[in-house]
Amino acid sequence: MVNSTNTSDAILARMMALHPKIIDLTLDRMWRLLKALGNPQEKLPPVVHLAGTNGKGSTQAMIRAGLEGRGDRVHAYTSPHLARFHERIRLAGDLIDEGHLATVLDECWEANDKQNITYFEITTCAAILAFSRTAADYTLLEVGLGGRLDATNVIGTPELTVITPVSKDHEQFLGETIAEIAAEKAGILKRGVPCIVGPQSEEAMEVIEQAAARIGAPLLAYGQHWHGHEERGRLVFQDEGGLLDLPLPALAGAHQIQNAGAALAALRYLGADEAACEAAMRNVSWPARMQRLKDGPLVEAAAGAELWLDGGHNAAAGKALADVISQLPKRSTHLVCGMLNTKDISGYLTPLAQVAESLTAVSIPDEPNTLPAEETARAARSVGFETYESANVLDAINAIIERSPGGRVLICGSLYLAGAVLRENA
């Protein structure tokens, strides 16, 4: 029986204190701890490594749905989690259970011997350790931040890499320009390992192509080696293997077409047939990506209004979200928004001001880096929103329903806010 000091929550809390910074990009501490653990990164099933600014989580989810659709057992690693840390680690199709998670976290804690290491690094080691001990056909690793110095970039020869669209985000760590950010993402490329490249700006694509040529990594790029588009309510995908006519992905939004294209290109490289590709579209699930909430206390509070949740948080995500809203049936739309103080709030909100009637600002609960509600409201007013402030999401929903019964309420601005909402609505 696990005692209270050795639950996963207790161990994770101790791990938070192992480094003074949340983010400190280097691989030295990873190599040290992985060596102490017996180099589990060398014992993983074939790895698909994904980087990019937007869409890598959705793309990974589609690849997993496709592989599982043909009967493969798939490990998956993603971050951040929404409601519980266990969401980050999926072992052969199932979320890691509490006993297994506590065991690998404790082993990493002991092997690290209280040396300096970030929370993300030591928990990534725990995920790799769990993956190395459980039989599976593939391991899907999603980069946490950047790529070149991300804690996941410890796989010598992955089976495949994927770079989804690159845009501005985390500039304080990755660089001020698209070219600088793309160079960091391209750090996951490996000699001789093919890379699926999603739609990119000309600036980003040039950097990725130069990096690939320098190390000898073959590219399978959107617009050159594969294409995907919507046609008459279907997804049409074409590569050198031929044409696929598939259902649209189960995830809402036109931006999911490009994510689906990258996922299908990856699946085809991995030998998936048309049935597996169709499963990737039909069976994919990815919470807090324009997710319609259909039951729970917050839905009851909405009293007949539509309630949606999205965790996008940068300028590109704001534009994609605005495009989704514009395609929904006409309905009065009101935002409940909370953001981190590290984000480009004006860049995120500007496109949304064209499709929503009001914004109610909230602070993200229990998040030290939240942008205060009054600052979110001030930024929203500057781009044209009618704004309000509320102490919490429930109060915000109640106030919106009182002003506009039967409308559409979209909670947005941060995955951390989305996680708080999912916990509250459980």
Image: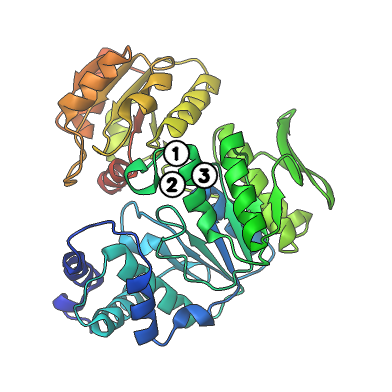
Q: Earlier in the sequence, mark 3 or mark 1?
A: 3
Label 3 vs label 1: CA separation? 15 Å
Image vertical order of residue 283 relative to residue 154, above or below:
above
Crowding around mark 2 (Cα neighbors within 10 Å: few <14, some 14 to 19, many 20+) is some
Q: Earlier in the sequence, mark 3 or mark 2?
A: 3
Looking at the rendered structure, the kind of residue marked 1 is Gln
Q: In this orientation, which residue lies closer to the viewer: 264 or 148?
A: 148
Compared across the picture, whether 205 is left or right of 409 comes to right
Image vertical order of residue 288 relative to residue 16, above or below:
above
User: Judging from the image, what secondary structure is the residue with disc 2 in?
Assistant: loop
Residue drawn at (76%, 43%), measured in percent from left and top? Answer: 224
Crowding around mark 3 (Cα neighbors within 10 Å: few <14, some 14 to 19, many 20+) is many
Residue 55 - label: 3
List x then y, in percent, for residue 216: 67, 62
Asked whether disc 2 touches disc 1, contact meaning CB atoms under 8 Å apart, the reply is yes
Q: Which residue is mark 2?
A: 287
Asked whether disc 3 touches disc 1, contact meaning CB atoms under 8 Å apart, the reply is no
Q: Which residue is mark 1?
A: 291
List x then y, in percent, for residue 123: 33, 69
Residue 65 - label: none
Q: Quadrant of residue 424?
A: top left
Q: In this orientation, which residue lies closer to the viewer: 210 or 368?
A: 210
Image vertical order of residue 360 relative to residue 66, above or below:
above
Label 2 vs label 1: CA separation? 6 Å
User: Judging from the image, what secondary structure is the residue with disc 3 in?
Assistant: loop
List x then y, in percent, for residue 337: 29, 30
